[in-house]
Amino acid sequence: MIRQLLSHDLPRNRLLTAVLLVILAGLAFAPFLFPGAKALNVAAKILIFIVLVASYDLLLGYTGIVSFAHTMFFGIGAYGIAIASTRMGPGWGSLLVGGLCAVALSLLLSLIIGLFSLRVRAIFYAMITLAVASAFQTLASQLSQFTGGEDGLNFKLPEMLSPAFQLAEEQVLGAWLDGKFITYYILFFTTVLLFLAMLRIVNSPFGRVLQAIRENDFRAEAIGYRIVVFRTLSNVLAAVFATLAGCMLAIWLRYNGPDTSLSFEIMVDILLIVVIGGMGTMYGAICGSAIFLLAQNYLQDLMRIASGTAQGLPLLPALLSPDRWLLWLGILFILSVYFFPTGIVGKLRTWRQ
């Protein structure tokens, strides 16, 4: 049963299996294990980034396409929910209409970009997507009547998803069963379904063709596959999943703005997570997202503790200052690339038992 759910793509390493189970258990029981607002917010972001990074891995890791427009589709999903909820009011219908319109727009844009740009060489395609993403971010900032401009849009969700909603008057196992609790588990089960869907895609005959194109596009075309069609379909699928991740982000935050979903920093984070987790593995999105977001949110706190412990020693307090957390995050990334050139998942899979 589990083998079928995972599309016969098992972790193939006991340590990797244990790591994935720990991450899954932590995310599944996060409201009970980590009841604080910050911890729950980090867990929700890990869920969102698993979908977002896995969708980008479908492009980069499995098809060999470098795109800088992925955050554009991410932002379309978030703006779809935000604009529909602002215009139509809080309701399930608003979420449905916003999500469907966002997916339809992403389908159209990704199809146009794919058909007109994927015929060129990889570097030129990357530059085209970068230009399109920059133009879309500028457009979102200037169309303040629809997008709220630089200030973004605050909106309300259905009553069941609002923090004021209570399923029970008392805590259950240390967690309040409120609207935030319900919203988190909607995100959790959505992430599981979307991840399993992407895992099925990459392990289908279609996914095998994508991998053949990644390895040698000339050979794939020589044996009869129209590589432009397959690359375009891969671009469309990745855009749809990124859009759904954007919808998840907007539902969780109840806000969206240009810096929240369209920032180029998010694109850099996606690239870092794909490299850390392992390109072309899917499971790398889970490991990479968990490690990166935990480091991003808690490394500064750990350095503050370490700096206080090292007081009185030469140089160490200054080196471990919380203000230098980005430096250490960069060092951790360099070390991970050096010791895990195929990513964490790739290294563990090739590690002899």
Image (cartoon, rainbow, N blue to C red):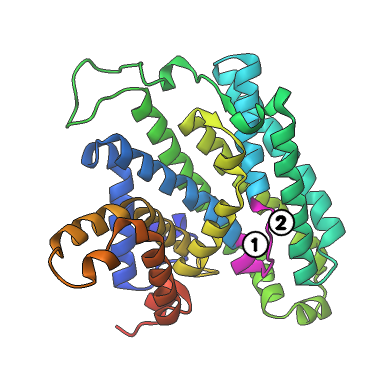
Q: Is residue 128 left or right of residue 61?
A: right
Residue that badge 2 annotates: 235
For label 1, the residue is 59
Mark 1–mark 2 CB contact (< 8 Å): yes
Which percent across, then down, holds residue 75? 63, 41
Q: Is residue 76 above or below residue 268?
A: above
Q: Residues within 10 Å of mark 2 (few under 14, many from 20)?
A: many
Work out whether residue 230 can be spotted. no
Total label count? 2
Residue 324 visible, this orientation? yes
| Magenta residues, start to end | 58-70
Q: Nearer the viewer, residue 25 or 134?
A: 134
Q: Nearer the viewer, residue 2 or 127?
A: 127
x and y percent of residue 339 in the render? 40, 81
* The C terminus lies in quadrant: bottom left
Q: Secondary structure at mark 2?
A: helix
From the viewer's perspective, is 216 left or right of 157?
right
* Tag 1: amino acid: Leu
Badge 1 marks a residue whose secondary structure is helix
